[in-house]
Image (spheres, grey):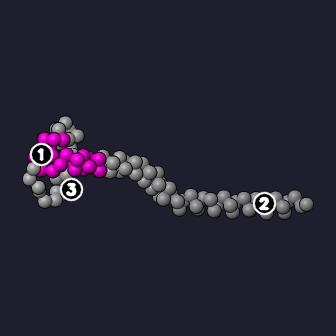
Amino acid sequence: MERHPGFSSREKRDAVLRVLAGDSEASVAGELGVPEDRLQRWRTTFTEAGYAALSRRHDDRHRSWLVKHRGPILQWGGMLIVLFLTVLLFTRMLIPE
């Protein structure tokens, strides 16, 4: 097996996609001149990164909603506290102990 210099990310991705599409690891590895275990590592890295990216998107979407609405949430919370204190003050003024 002839040894090739490093592969670009695009070349690794294309090789992994070929395997995922049904080409045998042996044939793809043979064409590229890499051991099958290296191609398997590329596939594992590729699929784990894809899973992590999909998981992170859901978390980021939820987090970004909170970040986007943080100002109004804090503003409404502050107004509720002021309203509560105002009601408490007037209650004590109207109903002396």
Residue beneath label 1, please?
30
Q: Nearer the viewer, residue 45 or 78?
A: 45
Image spot of residue 50 (x, y percent)? 32, 48
Amino acid under disc 2: Leu
Q: Is residue 55 left or right of residue 21?
A: right
Identity of the amino acid at label 1? Answer: Gly
The image quarter containing residue 93 is bottom right
Q: Is residue 78 left or right of residue 59?
A: right
**Residue 27 percent across, percent down from the top left:** 13, 41
Comes first in the chain, label 1 or label 2: 1
The quadrant of the image that shows the C terminus is: bottom right
Please indicate, yes or no, whether residue 13 appears anywhere in the rendered image. Answer: no
Category of crowding for the residue at label 1, using alpha-carbon neighbours closer than 10 angstroms: few (below 14), some (14–19), many (at least 20): some
Q: Which residue is mark 2?
A: 88
| Residue at 32 percent of width and 51 percent of height | 49
Circle 1/circle 2 CB separation < 8 Å:
no
Q: Residue at x 82, y 58 (%)?
A: 91
- Nearer-the-camera pick, 86 or 47: 47
Q: Secondary structure at mark 3?
A: helix
Q: Which residues are magenta?
A: 25-45
Asked which quadrant contains residue 25, the reply is top left
In reply to whether residue 29 is colored magenta, the answer given is yes
Instruction: Give above or below for 57 relative to 96.
Output: above
Tell me, yes or no, whether the highlighted magenta stretch contains residue 68.
no
From the image, state whether disc 1 or disc 3 is nearer to you.
1
Q: Amino acid at mark 3?
A: Ser
In primary-sequence order, the first of circles 1 and 3 is 3
- In primary-sequence order, the first of circles 3 and 2 is 3
Q: Which residue is mark 3?
A: 9
Task: Report, in whole angstroms, how far the alpha carbon at label 3 lies from the one at label 2.
Answer: 65 Å
Q: Residue 12 at what x, y percent from top left?
A: 19, 52
Q: In 3D space, how far apart are the residues under numbered discs 1 and 2 (Cα atoms)?
A: 79 Å
